[in-house]
Amino acid sequence: MFRMKYLLYFIFFHLVIGQLQINLHHTGGVNENENNDLLQHDCLRIDVLNGDKYVYREILFYCMNEFSSKFNIEENGYFPKFTFEQFSKQNITGQQLYLWSTPTDIIEDYQWYLNQLLISNDSPLSEKIFYNCTLPRFGSMCQYELDYCHSDYPSLYEMIKNFYNIYSYNPTDLTCYMHL
């Protein structure tokens, strides 16, 4: 019985290990006409565990800083798209959207939509579109792609760390100024 327990642990261990997730934050867009000091959008939050002697954790943020209206993001037919109404009829939960690397803003909107369904069946969010991206594509409309993406990494941090271990940065010129 003791060996059977460990055999089952070994068989189901791969289900416990997390899959690579890329959940963007602040995907609602930025209005150029507003006087915003903070123009960052489509942010990645990466949980990092660092240190050899002393272990410490930190969260790194990588954000876009350009106005999103400057980019032409075209809708493509490669990825299936669903409405919130279709998801609710299939009993899809916000937790499932999180595990599918959905941007957090969309997850929050969907959860708000589900909460509104308890009050009324008429919600303006029922027709909101969700693009079902598959890695290496991600984003609210699958507009981003990781060139160096392998499914065997447990986190985005591990993938980035391994990339820089393989392709180390060796600058040839430290500055673009001629007289320095």
Image (cartoon, helix red, strand yellow):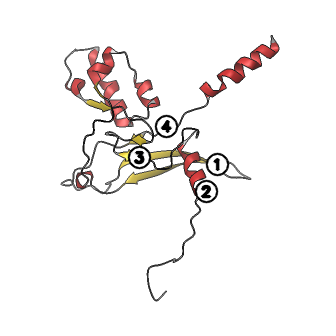
Judged from this view, the residue extending furthest toward the front is 78
Dividing the picture into quadrants, the one containing residue 23 is top left
Residue 68 spot, x, y in % from top left = 27, 51
Q: Is residue 131 above or below residue 64?
A: above
Task: In the rendered structure, find residue 145 and report the number of the disc placed on it.
Answer: 3
Residue 149 spot, x, y in % from top left = 51, 45
Find disc 1 in the rendering and name its residue.
56
Question: In the image, 13: left or right of 26?
Answer: right
Judged from this view, the residue extending furthest toward the top is 1
Q: Residues within 10 Å of mark 3 (few under 14, many from 20)?
A: few
Q: 131 or 124, which lies in front?
A: 131
Residue 70 spot, x, y in % from top left = 24, 55
Q: Residue at x 54, y 42 (%)?
A: 150
Q: Earlier in the sequence, mark 2 or mark 4?
A: 4
Calculate the distance from the C-alpha at mark 3 to the C-alpha at mark 2: 20 Å
Q: Residue at x 33, y 45 (%)?
A: 143
Marks 2 and 4 in Cβ contact (< 8 Å): no
Q: Amino acid at mark 4?
A: Gln
Calculate the distance from the C-alpha at mark 2 to the C-alpha at mark 1: 24 Å
Q: Secondary structure at mark 1?
A: strand
Task: In the rendered structure, find residue 21 and report the number of the disc placed on it.
Answer: 4
Q: Secondary structure at mark 2?
A: helix
Task: In the rendered structure, find residue 166 and report the number of the disc placed on it.
Answer: 2
Q: Amino acid at mark 3?
A: Glu
Q: Is residue 147 above or below residue 153?
A: below
Q: Earlier in the sequence, mark 1 or mark 3?
A: 1
Task: In the rendered structure, find residue 111 and report the number of the disc placed on it.
Answer: none
